[in-house]
Amino acid sequence: MLKNGCPGSQEIKQPKPEDIRCRHCGREVEIWSDETERKCKFCGKLNTRVIGQTCLDWCAFAKECVGEEKYRRLKAGRGN
């Protein structure tokens, strides 16, 4: 493993905000790139999204690299 983690883990370790459209009311909802769900601040309904394949799926050092809490949260949110 690299000293500061692999390049593939950077999006998980340094998330960025993204806007998605609420499936219930159509308003924009801010969700961070390391989140699988977020409640809409307008209608209060939960919006979920799929995070594609990441190093969490195959790297033996993923838990150590991104941190145990974030690893567990993301794996649980993905149905793994």
Image (cartoon, rainbow, N blue to C red):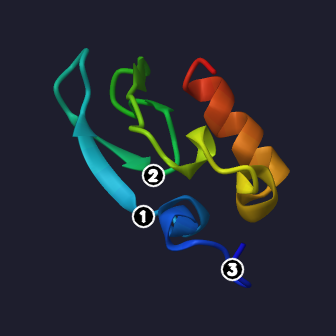
Q: Amino acid at mark 3?
A: Leu
Q: Which residue is mark 3?
A: 2
User: Which residue is pictured at 79% across the width and 57% down the height?
Assistant: 67
Label 2 environment density (alpha carbons within 10 Å; few <14, some 14–19, many ≥20): some
Q: Amino acid at mark 1?
A: Lys
User: Which residue is pictured at 50% across the width and 73% down the height?
Assistant: 7
- First reached walking from the N terminus: tag 1 or tag 3: 3
Label 3 environment density (alpha carbons within 10 Å; few <14, some 14–19, many ≥20): few
User: Which residue is pictured at 25% across the width and 40% down the height?
Assistant: 20
Q: Are marks 2 and 3 in contact (CB under 8 Å)?
A: no
Query: In the rendering, which numbered label is found on residue 32?
Result: 2
Q: Secondary structure at mark 1?
A: loop
* Residue 54 location (% of width, % of height): 49, 47
Quadrant in which the N terminus is drawn:
bottom right
Label 1 environment density (alpha carbons within 10 Å; few <14, some 14–19, many ≥20): few
* Residue 27 location (% of width, % of height): 20, 33
- First reached walking from the N terminus: tag 1 or tag 2: 1
Relative horizontal placement of residue 73, taking residue 23 as reference (left or right) = right
Q: Are marks 1 and 2 in contact (CB under 8 Å)?
A: yes
* Residue toward you, 74 or 42: 74
Q: Amino acid at mark 2?
A: Trp
Quarter residue 65 falls in: bottom right
- First reached walking from the N terminus: tag 2 or tag 3: 3
* Residue 78 location (% of width, % of height): 55, 25
Quadrant in which the C terminus is drawn:
top right
Q: Which residue is mark 1?
A: 16
User: Which residue is pictured at 16% across the width and 26% down the height?
Assistant: 26
* Between marks 1 and 3 in the image, the one whose residue lies nearer the viewer: 3
Q: CA distance from mark 1 to mark 2?
A: 5 Å
In this picture, is 72 found above or below 13?
Answer: above
Relative horizontal placement of residue 19, taking residue 58 as reference (left or right) = left
